[in-house]
Amino acid sequence: MSRIRAPLSIEHLKEIQGRNESADVLTLLWEVRRLRKIAATADELDRSLGPRVGMPGLIRASLRVQLDGGHCVVMQQPPAPE
């Protein structure tokens, strides 16, 4: 069992901010935003690199597992074509 909790939604983060408007909480929320941006950039880079082969492919596959399901990555996906 993983000790890491599921990612929080943007709505949940906004609720936390609404209940705790201290400077420390705002600083932490900006850090969450910064880290989500890094994850979204990693997702975009991984999707643009083509097939996953060899050792780099294993590393990218591991990254993909960590990125999949993250709210910041899911929110950035373009809508499916109709």
Image (cartoon, rainbow, N blue to C red):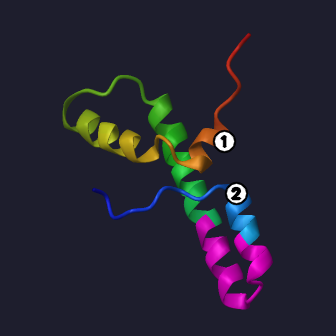
Question: Taking 21 as reference, is 78 above or below it?
Answer: above
Q: Read off the magenta span.
A: 16-32
How dense is the environment of label 1, judged by Cα within 10 Å: few (below 14), some, or many (20 and up)?
few
Q: Find numbered disc 2 in the image and state the secondary structure of the residue it sits on.
A: helix
Q: Is residue 9 left or right of residue 20?
A: left
Determine the residue positioned at 55% across, 63% down: 35
Return the residue found at the far front: 1
The prevailing secondary structure element of the residues shown in magenta is helix
Nearest the eye: 70 or 63: 70
What residue sits 27% from the left and 33% below the top? 57
Instruction: Identify the mark at residue 10; answer none if there is no mark.
Output: 2
Given this view, does label 1 or label 2 mark the residue nearer the observer?
Answer: 2
CA–CA distance in space, label 1 to label 2: 10 Å
Membership of 40 in magenta stretch = no
Amino acid carrying mark 1 in the image: Met
Residue 37 appears at what percent x and percent y? Answer: 60, 55
In the image as oriented, which residue stretches furthest toward the left? Answer: 54
Instruction: State which quadrant residue 50 falls in.
Output: top left
Image point (68%, 66%), residue name: 13
Marks 1,2: beta carbons within 8 A: yes
For badge 2, the amino acid type reads Ile
- Sequence-wise first label, 1 or 2: 2
The image shows residue 71 at horizontal and vertical percentages of: 59, 48
Find disc 1 in the rendering and name its residue. 75
Instruction: Specify the farthest residue to the top.
Output: 82
Q: Left or right: where does residue 35 sit relative to residue 14?
A: left
Q: Is residue 49 above or below residue 62?
A: above
The image position of residue 51, as x and y in percent, is: 35, 23
